Amino acid sequence: MSINLCHKVIINEVALYSIRMRLFILSMLAVLLFSLAMGGSSAGVAWVSGRRQIVDQLNSVTTLKEAEINAWLESLQTDIRVELYRDRAEERMLTLLQLETESSEFKNAYMEQHIRFENTILLRPVFEELFLMNRRGQIVIASPSEIEGEYRRSQTYFKAGLIQAGVHLQMFSLSGVSADWNTVVVVHPVQDEQGQVLGVLAGRASLDTLNQIMRERTGLGETGETYLVSSNNILLTDVRDAAYKTGQFFINTEGVNLAVAQHTSDYGWYVNYQDVPVVGVYRWLPRLQVVLLAEQHQDEAFRPIYVTIFINLIFMMVAILGVGILSMSVSRSIVVPIVKLAETAAQIASGDLSQVASVQREDEIGKLAKTFNHMTARLREMLEDEAQRAAALEQEIMERKQIEAALRESEDRYRHVSELTSDFTASVRVDEQGEWTAEWMTVAVTVITGYSFVELQTKGGLESIVHPDDRALVTRNMQAVLRGEAYVSEYRILTKSGETRWLRDYGYPEWDDMLDRVVHLYRAVQDITDRKQAEEGQHQLLQQVQAQARRMQQIIDTVPEGVILLDVERQVRQANPLGRQDLSMLAAVEEGEVLLKLGERPLDEFLTSPPKGLWHELPWEENVYQVLARSIETSATPAGWVLVIRDITQQREFEEHIQQQERLAAVGQLAAGIAHDFNNIMATVILYAQMIERSSTLSARDQRRITAIHQQAQHAAHLIQQILDFGRRAVLEMRELDLFALIKEHIDLLKRTIPENIQVDWTYDPGAYIIRGDPTRIRQMLMNLALNARDAMPKGGQLHIRLERQAFSSVHSVPVPDMEPGLWIKITVSDTGTGIPPDVLPRIFQPFFTTKEPGKGTGLGLAQAHGIVGVHGGYIDVETELGRGTTFVVYLPARVKTSAAAVSLSAEGHDLFTGKGETILLVEDSADTRQALVESLRLLGYRVLTAENGAQALAVLQQEAASIALVLSDVVMPEMGGVALFHNMRDRGYNMPVVLITGHPLDTKVKNLKGLAGWITKPPRLEILGETLANALEFN
Amino acid sequence: MMKKLMLLLLLCSLGICFPACASSTRVLPTSVALEKTLVPLDPDNEADAMPYAQVEETFGPLSTTEASYKIGVVLKFFGNQYWQLLANGVQDKASQLEVNIDVRAAATETDPEGQRQIMEDMLGQDYDAFIISPQTDDNLVEVVREAQQAGLIVLVVNEIVLDARHWVGPNQYEIGVAAANYFHSHLSEQVNVAVIEGLPGAYAARQRTLGFREALVSSSVQVVASEPGNWDSHQALEQAADVLDMHPDIRGFYCNNDVMAMGVIEAVNAVDKLDQIMIIGTDGIEPAYDAIRAGELTATIDSFPFITGQIALEITVRLLEGQAMPRVVYSPQALITAENVDQPLP
């Protein structure tokens, strides 16, 4: 043994310090040094030239982009030159720059040039705006024309444009509301014949083209990009990451900062705007004063260099491997024979004497092998004798083993038979004390229980693994056995693996008459687990079906409509709760009874399709029902019917309510539509009535009658006004209005008019209460709220009005949804009356809704107030408590202005303003209205000429211009309306004042008409007509 | 001399009573939960305030920091030169202190929702602090709260967010007072003037107008109109034209910013009254300086946006370094007229 160990140690040492290993290591070192030198130098070259190549590539992209930008800028300049010089445009522009805007040459030039501008933008959409500025930078003409009148004096492009043509980047905006400030503007001076610059023509080009040029990223890989940054560091064109928006991002990278600070172009390795290391080339574009950048992520840019170095490394590895293999094969031829001899010696030492060392050579190694072989031959002879004796002994042992095998085979056969059946049998010995001892069990017990017979014996027999729940049963079995009774029972056991199995156990006791007791028990046990599981599965299936049936019943029960199931005999088989309710209501029938009719109608009517629609309708008592029947068809004949019954009474009421609302809206629209004509009629009636009232020859009775006509006509006009207010179509005379003064005056009025048992008072916070509004409408709204309060307090009470200012800083704090934050004026009108019942509350602002007796109220008061508040941009809210009173809260937007013009309320009811015999040209198409106005004007002391429309009026003016002091004209007329007449008059040099009179809502066109002396609404009151005319004449 | 003394007394008394008035009438958004110790921000009336000139004296010079901070900056609108200059100031100080910055602004000056979106997007990234200037009092309230709850420092410039903890900017109220003083001392007895206001809801616009009006309460100079120009030159022009129409006797305009003053100049020129009507702007942008040199703009109250930007960044870094800064730091401001237009900083 110790000799063997020594051999092994020697062989290992030979392996570690072998000649082969030394040769191998030496040659590897040489190759490694060489490879490192080669690889290092080639990687260095790749690194330097690769970086140069990246910069060159970015540089060439930059040059290309710069050339494209310059070409685009050139084309812009060409375009603007063409715009200035083609089709005598320059001449027109000089006209626009030199002449008065009122002159016809100016107007003609404007019209024509405007069309030219529009065409250019349409045909060559390179420009978004084209405009001509005068020497002060004001835009004289532009397309789009919205910017006309604006000043661009402080923009660099304007200042530069006065000197020479050029292209400029707009660096800042003069508007806080426009996002389009970041644009390119191309300018060209406009000079007169003497070479003096009178203005600048400019075109604003969007940055889209630049964006397109920059977005073309061919040759820039996955991360490369080009973009422009203005000299104030603002991003001008899109970058890859859309989160960086143009005009909103301040770029602060080394590239941009260097280019902006030094106006230079160079390249560098720095972090970009996303903090990612990039290779960047930046170039200052002096013409636009912007920086052009081309950047690529260093990761991507350096990838080719890394790949080159990696390939070098691979080559190096392959070289090292090749040299290694070569050096190994050389050393092998020297070292292998020695190693083989050593291995043979080692094998012999471990006992294998048959080994012979091969002798292929005649050198020192060959001699050593021969000597070695001789020594082993001697050793082999000595050992052969010993071997023969051992063989005889072995023969004897063999025979004995054969006998044992035969015996084992017989046992196996018996075992295999019992293994083939899954059931097992067992025998138990029963002793005098009734204790059981298992004698044997067939092997199937192991298959079923997992325990071997021996294990079961140790545990205490089969009974020890019975499931705890079935122990009592087994105990009963054991007691039966002791009485000599056979048993059959099914119980569970727990197998060795913990699984539960079902067994069927047949027990047959053997009774010994001599001993008078049971001495043996023979058992046959079956595994019935599969059968038991099948039974269990069926049970679960049954439960699922039952659960599903219950769910279905729940669904039917919760359907919000009555569902009833009838069989062929019309007997009610089933109904949900609503169905049962419907049955008792409509037929007084319960489940199980036969249903013959619903309401008054036979059931069979409902079992067929209705004449129209899907549902039968069944009015019954105060309700309306819908019934739908569907037959249940399991075969060709119906097996029964499902009836669905629903109560649609409330839905009907709701539909009627909606229809009512729509009708009301239609009434409002219709009323507004006829208001103009109606007002014309009322104008005639009122004016005549007023004139007759003023006549001194009238008898007292006629005086009363004419007063009644006047009052009723005013009432009719008022009714129309209410409808217009509700429909928000009223003519408004908006102006700045001091609510404080208005309410103060209104309170005095209320104190005079409200019954004495109602106490009227008001409170207010100090401050200014200026709104923009129509005083007449606001008074009307206040009056309606006050009258509503009066009617709520038939037995007297308190009417309180409060005025205050409230500021809301955010949408969360406003009291009414949709209200804008800001400064609001709050008017509170509260009474101590009866309050509004909850069912009435939602409808109080509806028109024609009234709780008053017929004839006592029109139901328009609150609707009108609501409309008036709405048209003033305000909100109205109401709080009420039955028996305690009601509070209306009105919010109106406050005006901050505190100008002196803020509205002194003109006192009314003053004397008539009359004329001094001046001549007035009246233009009105309606003959009746015209006649009424003629007589009114005469009553006011004017001379009157008439015309039926604008065209006629111009003809009259041509004849009588010198004598006409004022023109009073309707606005809407068939041939030339009032506005057109006004313009025509001014064009022809008629400068007398013009007053317009209209029944239509005034649009801004009329309101903003510069130079209009005044306007009045139809039907005009005589005082207003007199005052307006007198003012217009005096002002002139 | 006596008149100036009276005015000074009046301003002092206003200064004392104003915080009390403001707290009783201000309507706070109900959703704003304020910290117990933190009163709603009102920089012009803040007790814990200090002019920038005293900062270095009190807290020592700020040496460059070891930590590499990243600061998000959300301004109003790059179209306005004021904010361009402020961004340049931030950048200048950032490169000096070797701090990373990321500066953004909304698409227009009246785009509060867009500005909120920008700030919300930036919240998800790894900024150590924010410098912001909200377009209105409300639009950044939620995001600022979110940032402050996450432990980030938020410094507000010029405008306000009620529960902001740090603020830098000029005293907006005093800007209005300065304009009022100029009118008071340069206009003769009993004249009318008008205000062209910025975007309603912006703190700066409100305070400048308030300062201007309150300073003139008992003066012979009367404010007869105050109209919103919404930071827009052309809207300002139209409002001014209306005012001139309604009050031909107007003798002065005060504009909440210079861009609007540019529009007012044109409105006044259109009625040929540039020699009769004084116009004062606010901000100190380049076109305003040009207009003062050209004799068209009487004055502007320059709040030195470049310097304000530098201060905002410096204070933010000081806060990041754990220095206990006052809640409000005032940046300098000065009235620029033809006399000092070429040497604005004293």
Image: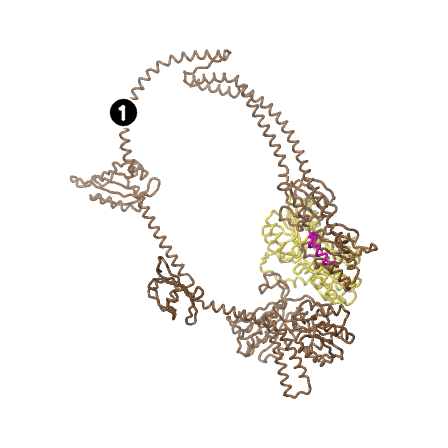
- Kind of residue indicated by mark 1: Ile
Quick one: A706 or A850, which is closer to the camera?
Answer: A706
Quick one: B51 or A946, which is closer to the camera?
Answer: A946
Task: Residue A116: say if magenta.
Answer: yes
Colour setup of the view: by chain
Check the picture and name the quadrant holding the C terminus of chain A.
bottom right
Residue A749 image position (x, y, % from top left): 63, 78
Determine the image quadrant of residue A578: bottom left
Using the image, name the chain to which the residue with label 1 belongs.
A
Quick one: A210 or B311, which is closer to the camera?
Answer: A210
Colour of chain A as rendered: brown
Give the left or right position of residue A476, taking residue B326 as reference: left
What secondary structure is the magenta-colored segment mainly? helix
Please rate how many residues cluster around mark 1, counting C-alpha atoms within 10 Å: few if below 14, some from 14 to 19, many from 20: few
Residue name at image x 35 percent, y 67 percent: A596
Residue A156 visible in the current orientation: no
Give the left or right position of residue A608, taking residue A1023 as reference: left
Query: Which secondary structure, mark 1?
Result: helix
Q: Is residue A276 above or below residue B342?
A: above
Q: Which residue is mark 1?
A: A403
Residue A407 visible in the current orientation: yes
Q: Is residue A117 above or below residue A754?
A: above
Give the left or right position of residue A211, taking residue B297 as reference: left
Chain that the image shows in yellow = B
Task: Residue B334: say if magenta.
Answer: no
Instruction: Check the image and name the residue furthest to the right.
Output: A194
Check the picture and name the quadrant holding the N terminus of chain A.
top left
Quick one: B46 or A188, which is closer to the camera?
Answer: A188
Residue B71 image position (x, y, % from top left): 64, 48
The span picked out in magenta is A113-127
Residue name at image x 76 percent, y 78 percent: A918
